Amino acid sequence: MIKHFFDGILTVDGWRQNRILEIAESGEILSMGDGRAEAADIVHKGYALPGMANVHSHAFQRAMAGLAEIGGPGADSFWSWRQVMYDFVGKITPDQLEAIAGQLYLEMLKAGFTSVGEFHYLHHDRDGRPFKDPAEMSGRILAAAAEIGIGLTLLPVLYRYSGFGGQAPLDHQRRFILDGEAYLQLLEKLQAAAAGQPAVVIGMAPHSLRAVDPALLTDVRAGAGAENPCHIHIAEQQKEVADCLDWSGKRPVEWLLENVAVDERWCLVHATHVTEAERRAIASSGAVAGLCPITEANLGDGIFPAAAFLNEGGRIALGSDSNIYVSLAEEIRLLEYGQRLTCGARNVLGDAENSTGTRIFLAALNGGHQALGRPGPAGLQTGAVADFVVLDPAHPALAGRPAEKIPDSWLFAGDNGVVKDVAVGGRMVIQNRRHEQEDRITWRFRAVMTELAATA
Ligand SMILES: [Zn+2]
């Protein structure tokens, strides 16, 4: 057992000063009480917040960050971005994926994320043939997360079709495609690999309504066991809504909620284009809306009606999705700023109890923990896993700030540089803004980026 002292800590009951957390070897918080720095094994001069779950990531896309910022002839769109992504995805080897994911997960820790939901659909070799071990690529994600020390909820993706109504897959989707049987075998293999690893949860992810059909969706959900987290991309783009209406006469969220037992195990990623009725139905289902404000802005997706949804008791979480830029602070402020620009008002997502930054942070903390099926209760309390982030009190963004103004000062006026130390499961993985393997991880990533740039 190790005793950690904090000047200030955001617990589930609000801010507390001069606290000692007793953390078991297993990573569980055994107790939290008043104390003095002299009584502790590790002294944190600063303010601790609970570590955040990042519920939606495609690791390989980190390697194309910045490469799709050029318009083609005519209006550029999500669909032309997707073409750049397809060109890129054809090149990546297992070793390269592991190197890219390692760098990305390191960046996530340094941004304040302590667990990640990896929505993983790059299953096969470059020619589209399955690897001898069908879990080869998934195994690289598991290895990268273990090496970096971030909590992982691996969401292997079922991608079967190219469009609504069971359209045959396209050639550039060849690395993604699985049928129901192969998918369930992959899940079983990954569940066995994750057994005995408390930091790893295996969930599932039908890619989108356009990539599966109703019978397949029902079969795999039944076959996989309904207790697993289940994530799906939904209603991200207007064209997807129009195509779904053409296919079924229903909008995507409307169709899903009418035809599938969506509950608190589900995370509906994006859900950008929803009617009021759909928005209320998601809120009452208990499912989490997985919002990815930086990527949604980058791709021109649109703005989720977060204010009404939160006021209806809806649950939200945050994801870095395309990983164009990894920053918890920027995800939160962009979520709020999108609402401000839409409503012509300030502090749209705050409420009477909490400041805007604190309310969004706590909502995303609880929603993220739920969506990733992370063990124990969410937040810093006895019985929870000791995932926390220590902010630097010497950072100019925090100068002179009382504890209750710390989240807003970081989230609205700071950046990743405010994050000083990070613990996952009680283990210090970032100390003084560095990971102990950082030089090696980043050197390896640079080498891979050079290799990929030279690959036609
Ligand atoms: Zn996505």
Image (cartoon, grey):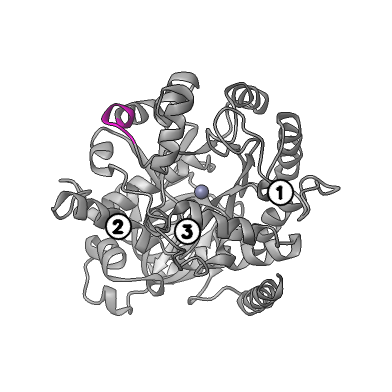
The x, y position of residue 97, in whole percent, is: 68, 61
Task: Measure how far apart labels 2 and 1 are at the Cα level.
Answer: 50 Å
Which numbered tag is attached to residue 16? 2
Residue type of the residue flagged with mark 3? Phe
Q: Residue at x 69, y 41 (%)?
A: 177
Which numbered tag is attached to residue 113? 3
Q: Nearer the viewer, residue 399 or 138?
A: 138
The answer to which of marks 3 and 1 sits earlier in the sequence is 3
Residue 4 horizontal side relative to residue 204, left or right: left
224 magenta-colored: no
One can see residue 425 in this view: no
Q: Is the shortest distance between ligand 1 and the CB of mark 1 under 8 Å?
A: no
* Secondary structure found at label 1: loop
Q: Check the picture and name the quadrant holding the C terminus.
A: bottom right
In the image, residue 245 sits, relative to residue 403, either above or below, namely above
Task: Measure how far apart labels 2 and 3 are at the Cα level.
Answer: 22 Å
Q: Which residue is mark 1?
A: 175
